[in-house]
Structures are given as structure tokens and as C-alpha cells.
Image (cartoon, helix red, strand yellow):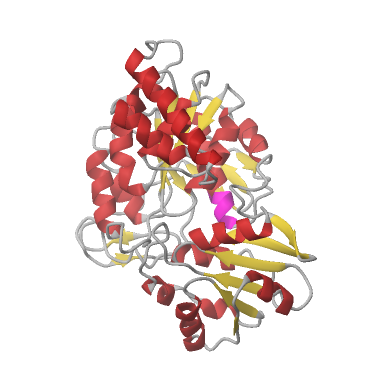
Amino acid sequence: MAGHPGNSEPLSPRAKLAVTAGKAAAAVSRAAGRGSGSVIGGRVALKLDPDLLGRLAQHLDVVLVSATNGKTTTTRLIAEALRASGPVVSNALGANMPAGITSALAGGSDAKFGVIEVDEKYLAGVARDVTPKAIALLNLSRDQLDRAAETRMLAEKWREGLNGTKAVVIANADDPLIVWAASSSPNVVWVAAGQEWKDDAWSCPSCGGVMQRPGDDWFCGECGFRRPSPSWVLSGDHVLDPHGSAWPIHLQLPGRANKANAATSAAVAAVFGVPPQVALERMYQVQAVAGRYDVVSFQGRELRLLLAKNPAGWLETFSLIDPPPTPVILSVNARGADGTDTSWLWDVDYTRLAGHPIYVIGDRKLDLAVRLEVAGLDFQVVDSIDEAVQSAPPGQIELIANYTAFQDVRRRVGN
């Protein structure tokens, strides 16, 4: 299998030229103030050598991480865990399409492990190119409806693309769509990581029948498709390994969703020979992920920055914020990277914010205002984060934003 350090061939002259040209393009992009340059650098490199991604991965033990929510954080947690056994290269900033992945791997010639976040649409293709040792599948839910396939179609594509893969697939047993996608793989490690958002998994992905969901279990009463028995289990503040040993999860990242990410990451680390105790201890180092969960000072106030891109993500985020009367700023855009369709706002249960002073900003603040009005909430629409912060009552402010709105906020607050 590709992915064993030391047995790779040196890069060809063409591949070396592609890497050099990509790095030069990235440097020009950075100098022009147009971001990290990872995407344009990768595009230039792949144009010069279309097989470069596979060549750059051939000396690495690779794990791919894909999901609708939590893939950037889980990628970061796995990378920390695997550093116990050797150097890691990772696309830690979330550039998760082939160009961004190529840029990241171009900087990892001395690495032993590649920990790669992959956009859901590209998972099968990237897996074909890099021959991973492991693939982590966390969840599937509705997101970017104008761009991504409907969730069941996406699960079907994964199922076809991963059919017969030699990789160990580490998959969430609590998400029926993930179980359907992973079940074509001959070697699956099931993790009971939980699933709070269930509204994309009420019909059976196998036959279309109605799913039965007694407690944490699930099954289809028509075709018998059912939840597999997990070998790793998230139980409160511990993860139970396949031997039944309970290992404490101590994270600086908040919320149950991140404990689930840690449980999956511990299962992945075990595939690479890193024991749960070592893996989980190393995960404590992670304080923030690409600005998410950071607490920043702005205009004399403390703001906690939280990213929520889709209904499942908003649901998890509402469970993390401090209770009322903590002020909350909500910001929603609908640019290309967010998905231009904001109909998903109607799937979010905003009544969970009752009692919080709410301030609404962002390109689509009026769309969000209509949604909050229908939910019967008190809120103010304001023009900027500056105005929202000045209007908010005392105390730390929770700021929840979708993808490009989150980047706008980070630039404004200097994070």
C-alpha cells in the first residue's frame, strides 16, 4: 500500500517543477494580500503535473477526514495525536479540495503522516489518488444546497467510491447515512459518536423506508438495515476502547460535539499504533481551530468566535453558548463559499436563543431577521460588528457566524 515512509521514489523533474511553480504562485498571492495562496498554488502545480497529489502522498501514511461538520477540528485532533509517533503534514487551515490538499502536501517532504481534511464532494477521488491507510467519516447533513448533492446521493457516491477500499474506515455508527456509505468497505471500525441532528436521516438510505429510532438505536423496519455494534464508544467524558477500558477526554475545546470528534480521533490514532491515553493527552493541546472557539478582545469587550455553517452546526453551537442573559451576535452571508441558498435558515431551531439579547449582522441579515421574527424572538438588526458590540449589555459576547461571515469577523477583530 502506498503510504510507508522510506519506500517512495524521488520526485520526477516534472513534479519538482510543479511544486516550485505552485509555491511561487502562492507566494505572489500572499504578497498581494489575497490570502494564504494555498489554493492558487495547488491549482498551478496540478496544471503542470496532474498526478502530483498521488506522488506527494506516496511516502506518507495518510488518513482522510470527511464530514459535513467537524472535519477541520477532527483533522487537527488527529494530527496532534499522530505527532506522538512522527512528523505530520496536514491542511490545517481547511483548504480541503484537491488544489489545497496538494499545496499542503508539497510542504511535507519530511513528514511520516498525512492528515488530510477532504471536502465531501472530492472524497472518493482523493482516496483514489493518495491510497490512504485510514478514512474517518463523521456525519452527513444538509449543507450548501446549491452546490452539494442531496445527502442521500452523497452517501451513495461515498459508498460507490469506497467500495473495496484497502483503507481502514473509521465511521460514526450513530449516523445512518454514514453507516450506509461505509458499509461497502471491507474493514470498518464503528464509533458510537452520537448524532444530535437527525432531520436528514428519517428515511432508510438502503430502501427508502421509515427509520425507527428507539433511544440511541436505529433501524429500518422494512429492510432490516440497522445500527452496527460500535467498538469505540463516547460515554460522557470518557471514550471506551474495544477492550472496554475507559479513557478520560480532557479538551480545551467546548461542547459534546468536540468530545465526539476526540473519540473518533482516538479510534483513528489506534489504527496508526498510538494508544488512546497518549492520543487523548495530546489533544488537550488544541485550544482553537482556525479561529474557532477563540476568545478575542474587541472594543474593550470579550467575544467568543463560533462557526456554524448549516442546521446541524447551529444546533451543536447553541448547546455550547453561555446561558441568558449572555448577548449573542449572529452573522450570515450567502457568498460562493457559504452556498448562495439561505433556505436552510428555516431548518434551524432559533427558539433556543430565547432570553438572549440578539444582534443580527452580515450580508443576509434581513433573511435572518425574518426567520427570527417568525420564531418570536427579540432582536436588533445592526449594520456592523462594531455597532453590535457597542449595543450589547455587559459580559462576554457569543458571536456565531457562517463561513465567510466568520472570516469577515476575524479580519475586523484582528484575529
Query: What is the span of residues highlighted in magenta in the rendered image?
Result: 256-260
Residue in view at x 36 percent, y 62 percent: 142
Residue in view at x 32 percent, y 66 percent: 202
Q: Quadrant of residue 300?
A: bottom right
Q: In the shown orientation, is residue 45 left or right of residue 193?
A: left
Above or below residue 242? Residue 200 is below
Residue in view at x 49 percent, y 25 percent: 113
Image x and y of residue 180, in percent: 29, 50
Viewer-nearest residue: 227 or 24 = 24
Q: Quadrant of residue 122?
A: top left
Q: Quadrant of residue 221?
A: bottom left
Residue in view at x 52 percent, y 43 percent: 32
Count of labels in the image: 0
Above or below residue 374? Residue 203 is above
Q: In the shown orientation, is residue 231 left or right of residue 146?
A: right
Residue 94 appears in view:
yes
Residue 57 appears in view:
no
Above or below residue 65? Residue 220 is below
Image x and y of residue 231, in percent: 46, 40
Q: Is residue 228 magenta?
A: no
Viewer-nearest residue: 415 or 221 = 415
Image x and y of residue 163, in percent: 24, 37
Q: In the shown orientation, is residue 63 left or right of residue 412?
A: left
Q: Main secondary structure of the magenta part?
A: helix
Q: Quadrant of the N terminus?
A: top left
Image x and y of residue 107, in percent: 50, 26
